[in-house]
Amino acid sequence: MYRKILILCLMLINAVCFGQKPLEMALNSGWLFHKSGDAEWMKATVPGTVHTDLLDNKKIPDPYYRNNEKQVQWIDKANWVYQKSFDVPAELMGMEHLELDFKGLDTYADVYLNEQLLFKADNFFVSWTAEVKKVLKAKGNVLRLLFHSPTAMGLEGLKKLGYALPSPNDQSKTGGMGKDQVGIFLRKPGYHFGWDWGPRLVTSGIWLPVGLKGWNTVRLSDVFYEQQKVSKDNATLLGHVTLQATKATEVELSVTSDGKLMATLKATVKAGTTTLDLPFEMLKPRLWWPHNLGTPYMYDFKVELAQGRVLRDVQYKKIGIRDIKVIQKPDSAGSSFYVQVNGVPVFCKGANYIPQDMFIPRVSDGKYKSLIDAAKTANINMLRVWGGGFYEKDLFYDLCDEKGIMVWQDFMFACSMIPGDSAYLDKIQKEASYNINRLRHRPSIVLWCGNNEIDLAWANYQEKAGWGWKQRYTDVQQADLWRNYQKVFTQILPDALKKALPAAFYWSSSPFNTKYAHATDVSAHGDMHYWGVWYAEHDFTAFADHVGRFVSEYGFQSFPEFATVKKFTIAQDWKIDSEVMLSHQRTDIGNQRIKTYMDRYYKTPSDFKNLLYMGQVLQAEGMKVGMETHRRAMPYNMGSLYWQINDCWPVASWSGMDYYQNWKGLHYFVKKAFQNLLVSPYVKNDQLNVQVVSDSLVTVQAKLSLSVTDFTGKVIWNKTQEVSIKPNASALLYTIPVIEVLKGNNKEDVFLAAKLAAKDHTLAENVLYFDRIKNVNLPLVKVKHSLKQLKNGVELSLSANALAKNVYLNFEGTEGHFSDNYFDLLPGETKKVSFITEEKAIGKLSVLTVRDTYKN
């Protein structure tokens, strides 16, 4: 075989022959683990965690079931040992360099090979490598990792500092730690120590794959395509190719894109690490766009590294060509804050994203795909990777790149001041450089943010502002803590970005106003988090009084659906105030807030199951007000990111999808509120206003139809007019006193239907009620339905002879989602809804409306 290759190479003088390229051997199977000091070894899964390995070996109960979380708090107090034996194939063993590569270790791990210490890992957020050529044997190698108790390591950090740091979400009491909140002293996901939507489950383990890599002479270690100038006519790129060589050698590099040669370079490199630059242009490039504005086109780029006529290495990357800017320009109200893509201002419609599980390695590729698909289906064009989790896996960004979903990327700091010793700052420097380099080619990442809510909470420049943190410390301590903050968020992080990704936009904290002023509920600069709805018990109408330039957090809670609740409870738990339900509600005020708003807007549901449904209706209808308010305020406001799209375990939270990715009412409402064309009727000062918002980049000609109808379908008032909807704009199209459209009818007995249509095709529609639903005289109604079989589910045809408010459809025991749900079925209307599922047998259909949840 080798002779044939040699002959072929000699025949094809201009061809490059394949040499011995880098090889890699996976080391993810055959692992054992035990508690340090115990004799019993158990099978382990890598990637994995101690908790999931103990669960697989039936040593602990499911931490998510009932109150079992409390029974597993001992795990993070122990040290754990992981070990495997392996042989090395002769081909790999014969290579000049052999490198052990740990993509992710959680978190403090002493790594030994054949009883020789290779390194001591101390950061969850970076990879770890070690040259092992001199330590490896052909057969009988033993790889052993000692994981130190993360809480013990955190206690060392606390003791070293000498005083506690504010860390309100660290559930130290649940963990048996009393007041000792230690999570912030570790470079590890903060949410592992608890949050107001998550449990305290502090993991250890090998959380990403492990491999043994071998290479000869020279290899590619990094490739980055810097986009220096991008327009629809041409793109100027500079390929930065980093090589590692064992000795001085001549190399030839070539860059191709979609099979077309873009650049070549011959050079002599020295032993060690060298970066070579290859400039090139692309004429008439296909640009990457957010999915709601165009195609998120991705080019296939390939770099080949040759030594003479021997091909030594190849690296592939998918690249999206786009021009991204965050525009902050002074205006009469303050200054703008919006994302501009390829010269177009983009309204960011989206959500905050948290890790999908407490045990990260068990989130399947399928769950990642279904979550991003669900985001795109709901017309979301931005996800914020929040700073209390982790820098996500490559697959997450692959999917966002492919689906055209922009990413607001936080660095991993949230809701706590930080230590400032040199060792901690050095970890942050390495962590920032590693993750910027890993992610800098991603077209989806449009913004890098230093932290979540720390500037707001500390409020250094306003004595009476903030969360009361400053007042706990002496003047000297305050100065030290603020100095530490500035070192990280105004020096280390932006400097790391400037070095690795000069064009990137950096935002030091979210929310943030200006350099010497902190964000408020009505900030006229930067971004804002508005929590007056929920924490301050503001009415939903207050969203209109608290509109910023970019609203990057706001939200309202609900419980998951009954099918989810049944997975972590038994019948005796089915009360909102039961011990188990309260343990799956992580904020002390949560249930009371839901009750307060429920009493304000709806009649009291008759039982537990109805309360769960009505909680989702309450959340969805309230958040609808916020989303529509933000979009109507365009272009003053250019972002609406609600808290939060997902959950990390089954819990009452602000999420639009529960832990099992069941869509709550909120997610269905997001789909409508975030579609490119929105018709939004609202009442202000006794005036009915109808506003239309368009994210489309072309003018839309349509017919606007308005009708006020009673609950049996009798039309009280109507209006039709032709409208021209300007691109990428919001406009008030119609206004009239409410009294004129009621025509003497009680506001509790009628509703307004608004519709935009073109050539009998509905472009957008909406419904408005003139009073709170608890005051509205909803009729008792039976929803009729028929079913039609589809290839991957069923289609329902639904109708009713009177208004059916917030129709909730559920095929009992069947996983899937509807094309629409929790919708208002208007009298005389026939509505078609599809149910998509992978299951062959579909359960019994149940239909529930608001009127069904109370007797009188």
Image (tube, rainbow, N blue to C red):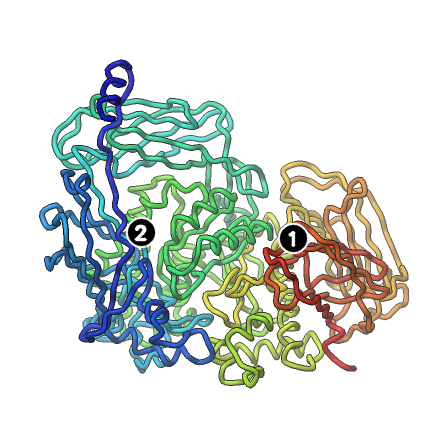
Residue drawn at point x = 28 percent, y = 38 percent: 222
Along the line of sight, the residue nearer the viewer: 361 or 25: 25
Type of amino acid under label 2: Leu
Residue 246 in view here: yes
Q: Is residue 546 left or right of residue 143?
A: right
Q: Is residue 769 left or right of residue 465?
A: right
Q: Secondary structure at mark 2?
A: helix
Residue matched to label 2: 493
Location of residue 739 in the rendering, given as x and y in whole percent from the top left corner: 85, 64
Along the line of sight, the residue nearer the viewer: 195 or 815: 815
The answer to which quarter of the image holds residue 809 is bottom right
Location of residue 666 in the rendering, given as x and y in whole percent from the top left corner: 61, 62
Q: Secondary structure at mark 1?
A: helix
Location of residue 743 in the rendering, given as x and y in whole percent from the top left corner: 90, 63
**Location of the N terminus (image quadrant):** top left
Give how far apart the Cα atoms at labels 2 and 1 are: 35 Å
**Location of the C terminus (image quadrant):** bottom right
Along the line of sight, the residue nearer the viewer: 28 or 725: 28
Residue 476 in view here: no
Residue 436's tag is none
Location of residue 694 in the rendering, given as x and y in whole percent from the top left corner: 66, 45
Q: Earlier in the sequence, mark 2 or mark 1?
A: 2
Type of amino acid under label 1: Arg
Q: Residues within 10 Å of mark 1 (few under 14, many from 20)?
A: many
Q: Is residue 224 left or right of residue 623?
A: left
Residue 632's tag is 1
